[in-house]
Image (cartoon, rainbow, N blue to C red):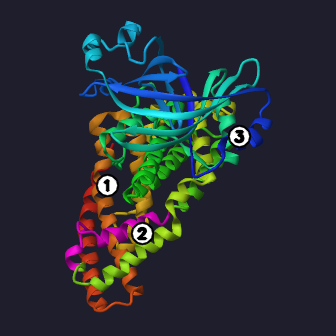
């Protein structure tokens, strides 16, 4: 079982020199240094049979010696990856599937047929600087820095990454080393393996933003600790995936995924803190709230983009005001220059925070303070969901007539209830899951449109453009009509309170 943390290097920096100067002296133990040049060919069939089986097949060459490796699907928590690995020495640089243990193959795999169809999909070639660490009699770690490239069909992608692999000892030791690295190097979490990046390069496809995740999978006997760790994984994976998407494509839609992922993680901590009370979790929640505030501008950026989009809901009206559209374009570009999302992703605070969150499931600090983590989460889930509903009903009382600002203020409570349902509602079956969430999705969609119109009104107040009074009047009318429709939906929703 391979267990490793992956960190990607941001920018140009002498990684090996900094490790030797600033990290190794702080680690108690012995370090052996070496360097190798590695050339790897990754194989699959024309229909990507290995990919569909959750496998990766690699032949590695080093100093005239060859080894074939199959890695099978494992588990990923943030930048921590754990997966089975099967290695066989080869006499020649061509794979021979018959040499692998038969037990590694799925039941329906036809190994001889796979062998006949094998072809090189992509290659990796890199220099590996190896720091073999023996920290104590029980802990052995291989810290490596890889620098080179992935190649596929004439296209290349840079490799500049650190892997910290556990050879023996406790997984927590990986985080101790990683924290020292993050303190002195510009790093970010690595969520894609070289193989995953190679397949993407070979396919010619781009990473794409994903919709809000589905429900966290929970069994009736899940403990509070298990449910929390799964909710944390959902949010962290969503957050980090969209960071990778943005850095690879620069598409602003991915920024929404980053902010949503941070919000998901924050809400997971907020929900479970009463049962997992400990200083470590409370400190992380404070850091998350501060970090979420640093991404406050994302909604406004995407709303400006939507106002200018050819597919935007108000494009037909706004296209008559080209001077205002030009003004919005300037605002959009100005915000990107001001907030510099790529730099924000690569900050030390972001990487350190993600690393600390990833380590939670390994370090389980709450176990030192109470035993509530052992309790079945189902004993509390129904009460938590009911509390979310009550909080909405208090913030959106039936007997109160709502206006634009009321709806904008209610968004936070609705998001909290929605996220709680993602975390818990799977315990109650499909019908109950939708019952807890569906009534409010239309309201949230309406709030999104209200936010767009509200931003339009705010921008019109600042813009020095012609005919803006007529546009403001149109906008005010749209807001009034939308609020009337939402009021009807809200009254219906509050009559369908889940049991």
Q: Which residue is mark 3?
A: 19
Q: Which residue is mark 1?
A: 440
Give x and y (percent) for residue 115.
29, 15
Query: Any magenta on residue 480?
Result: no
What secondary structure is the stretch in magenta mostly built from? Answer: helix
Give x and y (percent) for residue 96.
37, 12
Tell me how far mark 3 sits from mark 2, CA to CA: 40 Å
Give x and y (percent) for residue 149.
48, 40
Q: Is residue 407 left or right of residue 139?
A: left
Q: Which residue is mark 2?
A: 300
Q: Residue at x 37, y 81 (%)?
A: 327
Along the line of sight, the residue nearer the viewer: 235 or 254: 254
Q: Residues within 10 Å of mark 3 (few under 14, many from 20)?
A: some
Q: Which mark is residue 137?
A: none
Task: Give the mark, 1 or 2, whose residue is nearer the N terminus.
Answer: 2
Please state the extent of the stretch shown in magenta in the rendering.
296-317
Q: Residues within 10 Å of mark 2 (few under 14, many from 20)?
A: some
| Element assignment for label 3 | helix
Front tag of 1 and 3: 3
């Amino acid at each position: 079982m391979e267990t490793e943390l992956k960190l990607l290097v941001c920018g140009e920096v002498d990684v090996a020199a900094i490790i030797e100067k600033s990290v190794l002296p702080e680690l108690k133990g012995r370090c052996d240094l070496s360097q190798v040049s590695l050339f790897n060919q990754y194989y699959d069939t024309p229909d990507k049979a290995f990919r569909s089986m959750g496998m990766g097949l690699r032949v590695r060459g080093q100093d005239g010696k060859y080894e074939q490796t199959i890695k099978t699907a494992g588990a990923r928590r943030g930048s921590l990856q754990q997966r089975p690995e099967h290695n066989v020495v080869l006499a020649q640089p061509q794979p021979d599937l018959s040499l692998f243990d038969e037990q590694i193959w799925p039941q329906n795999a036809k190994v001889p047929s796979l062998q006949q169809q094998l072809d090189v999909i992509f290659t990796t070639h890199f220099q590996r600087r190896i720091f073999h660490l023996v920290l104590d009699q029980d802990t052995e770690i291989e810290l490596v820095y890889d620098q080179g490239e992935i190649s596929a069909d004439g296209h290349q992608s840079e490799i500049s990454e650190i892997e910290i692999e556990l050879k023996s000892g406790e997984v927590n030791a990986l985080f101790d080393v990683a924290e020292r690295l993050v303190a002195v190097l510009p790093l970010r979490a690595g969520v894609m393996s070289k193989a995953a990046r190679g397949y993407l390069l070979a396919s010619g496809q781009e990473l794409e933003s994903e919709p809000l995740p589905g429900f966290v999978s929970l069994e009736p006997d899940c403990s509070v600790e298990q449910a929390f760790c799964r909710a944390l994984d959902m949010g962290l994976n969503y957050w980090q995936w969209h960071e990778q998407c943005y850095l690879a494509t620069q598409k602003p839609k991915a920024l929404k995924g980053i902010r949503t992922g941070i919000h998901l993680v924050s809400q997971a901590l907020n929900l479970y803190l009463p049962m997992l009370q400990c200083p470590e979790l409370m400190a992380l929640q404070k850091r998350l709230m501060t970090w979420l505030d640093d991404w406050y501008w994302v909604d406004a950026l995407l709303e400006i983009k939507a106002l200018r989009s050819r597919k935007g809901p108000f494009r037909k009206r706004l296209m008559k005001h080209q001077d205002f559209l030009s003004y919005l374009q300037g605002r959009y570009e100005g915000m990107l220059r001001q907030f510099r999302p790529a730099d924000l992703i690569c900050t030390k605070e972001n990487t350190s925070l993600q690393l600390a969150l990833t380590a939670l499931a390994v370090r389980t600090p709450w176990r030192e303070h109470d035993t509530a983590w052992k309790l079945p989460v189902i004993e509390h889930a129904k009460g938590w969901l009911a509390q979310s509903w009550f909080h909405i009903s208090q913030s959106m009382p039936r007997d109160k007539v709502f206006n634009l600002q009321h709806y904008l203020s209610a968004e936070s409570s609705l998001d909290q209830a929605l996220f709680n349902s993602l975390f818990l509602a799977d315990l109650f079956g499909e019908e109950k899951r939708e019952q807890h969430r569906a009534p409010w999705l239309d309201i949230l969609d309406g709030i999104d449109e209200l936010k767009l119109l509200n931003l339009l009104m705010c921008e019109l107040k600042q813009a020095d453009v012609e005919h803006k009074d007529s546009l403001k009047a149109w906008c005010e009318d749209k807001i009034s009509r939308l609020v009337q429709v939402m009021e009807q939906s809200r009254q219906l929703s509050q009559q369908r309170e889940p049991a």
